[in-house]
Image: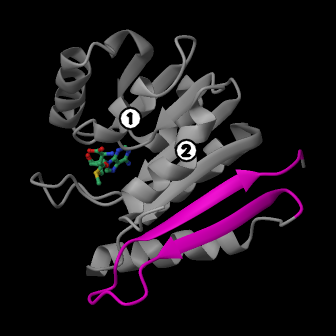
Amino acid sequence: MAVVNATQMAHKFILPRLANATLVIDATAGNGNDTLFLAKNSSAETTVWAFDIQPHAIANTRLLLEKHDFSHKVRLILDNHANIANYISHPIDIAMFNLGYLPGGDHSKNTCPETTLQALKQTLQLITVGGLLTIATYPGYEHGKMETAAVHQYLTTLPQQTFTVASWTMVNQVNSPPVLYIIEKRRSE
Ligand SMILES: C[S@@+](CC[C@H](N)C(=O)[O-])C[C@H]1O[C@@H](n2cnc3c(N)ncnc32)[C@H](O)[C@@H]1O
């Protein structure tokens, strides 16, 4: 298996589980690449919910999905992922959080630790046993460093009987490379 970047690594973990997933979340739709990956590789019965706070991110994602003919499987939500529980009450099989800002977009529209943690808590409440959540964080700039620390700290509090929590990063890259967290729910609380 080739060593790749944090997002591609997240895809590698998620891919084998998509065929049996019913409800999947992309918590940060951005340009729609992850949303498309989730829609394309899941079954016809899967619904993907994709959230973003920026109208043009939602518009870009819509365009990409239309281009590849996957719009019918995706619910696009222009809202903060801190409100996930307002939209979803069914069990979640897979959730992807690709944090930070939209590449080529407004860098001030970062994900922020407070709402990220709210969204993570809501998602973990709903995740199924055997379900997977991935979080890509970007400690290479000041805000991302703070957010990575907050996410890391929160994840250390998850009980190991219930969740397996792992992390992946490059160890020989300059400038604090991205970190991928992989969380699997092992059993009900
Ligand atoms: C790194 S980009 C996501 C990349 C995307 N998954 C893709 O495949 O192109 C981060 C995105 O998170 C969005 N975002 C920031 N804060 C958010 C929040 N509280 N809720 C939902 N989306 C948020 C930004 O608008 C941005 O589009």
**Residue at horizontal 21%, vertical 36%?**
57
Q: In the picture provided, is 60 more to the left or to the right than 173?
A: left
Where does the image place residue 50, in percent across and percent down from the top left?
A: 40, 31
Q: Mark 2 points at which residue?
A: 14
Find out whether residue 179 is within the magenta segment.
yes
Where does the image place residue 19, in percent across and percent down from the top left?
A: 60, 26
Q: Which of marks 2 and 1 precedes in the sequence?
A: 2
Q: In the picture provided, is 67 more to the left or to the right than 182?
A: left
Q: Does residue 154 sit above or below 173 in this rendering?
A: above
Q: Mark 1 points at which residue?
A: 37
Helix, strand or loop status at disc 1: helix
Helix, strand or loop status at disc 2: helix
Q: Does residue 71 sit above or below 97 in this rendering?
A: above
Residues in magenta, as a range: 161-188
**Residue at horizontal 44%, vertical 42%?**
27
Q: What residue type is labelled 2?
A: Ile
Find out whether residue 78 is within the magenta segment.
no
Determine which of the numbered discs, if any, sits on residue 76 in the image.
none
